[in-house]
Image (cartoon, rainbow, N blue to C red):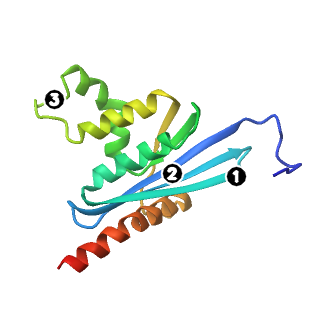
Amino acid sequence: MTDASIPSAAPTEIWAFTDGACSGNPGPGGWGVLLQARRAGAILREREISGGEPMTTNNRMELMAAIAALEALERPAAITVVTDSAYVKGGITEWLANWKRRGWRTADGKPVKNEDLWRRLEAATARHRVAWRWIKGHAGHAENERADALARAGMAPFKAGQRAAR
């Protein structure tokens, strides 16, 4: 794609809009990611990815969305990950170092929930220069709404299986 209005010297920015969804908590869940490569505000490329699990929690699906976004990148990159999960943003930017220092225990000595996914997210983050941004979910943010739709689509096959099992 060539567009004379997009300066070729402008850097390409990578953005990941992530979301998780769960029907019941725990219950069938899904995660979704909208990846965008942008230059000077113009979208150069987009990629949508999603997945799900038959029995999970919303927090696990939020973590999986962030993990999937970072693992989808073929080479190390600077990326902005946008999440509507205060759990994901707080965990990766504020709490992780203390959890590790305490042997994967919370401040009150309890085991950290979802340790397996926090370790996987930390490993996926290590390859990249990641900026984390939190936005309010279900507030009309177009890319977040698309990520939410992908998460619900990722959950759909497992939700249908739940209805059939009743």
The amino acid pointed to by label 2 is Phe
- Mark 2–mark 1 contact, CB under 8 Å? no
Q: Residue furthest right?
A: 4
The amino acid pointed to by label 1 is Ile
* Position above or below: 54 against 104: below
Left/right placement of residue 8 relative to residue 20 reads right
* Position above or below: 14 against 160: above
Q: Which residue is mark 2?
A: 17
Judged by depth in the image, the label closer to the viewer, 1 or 3, is: 1
Q: What secondary structure is found at the residue carrying circle 2?
A: strand
The amino acid pointed to by label 3 is Ala
- Identify the residue at horizontal 30%, vertical 24% (top origin): 97
- Identify the residue at horizontal 21%, vertical 61% (top origin): 25
Q: Quadrant of residue 164?
A: bottom left
Q: Which residue is mark 1?
A: 43
* Position above or below: 29 against 68: below
What separation in Å lies between label 2 and label 3 (alpha carbons)?
30 Å
Q: Position of residue 34 (x, y in %)?
A: 54, 54
Q: Residues within 10 Å of mark 3 (few under 14, many from 20)?
A: few
Left/right placement of residue 100 relative to residue 86 reads left
What separation in Å lies between label 2 and label 1 (alpha carbons)?
14 Å
Left/right placement of residue 98 relative to residue 121 reads left
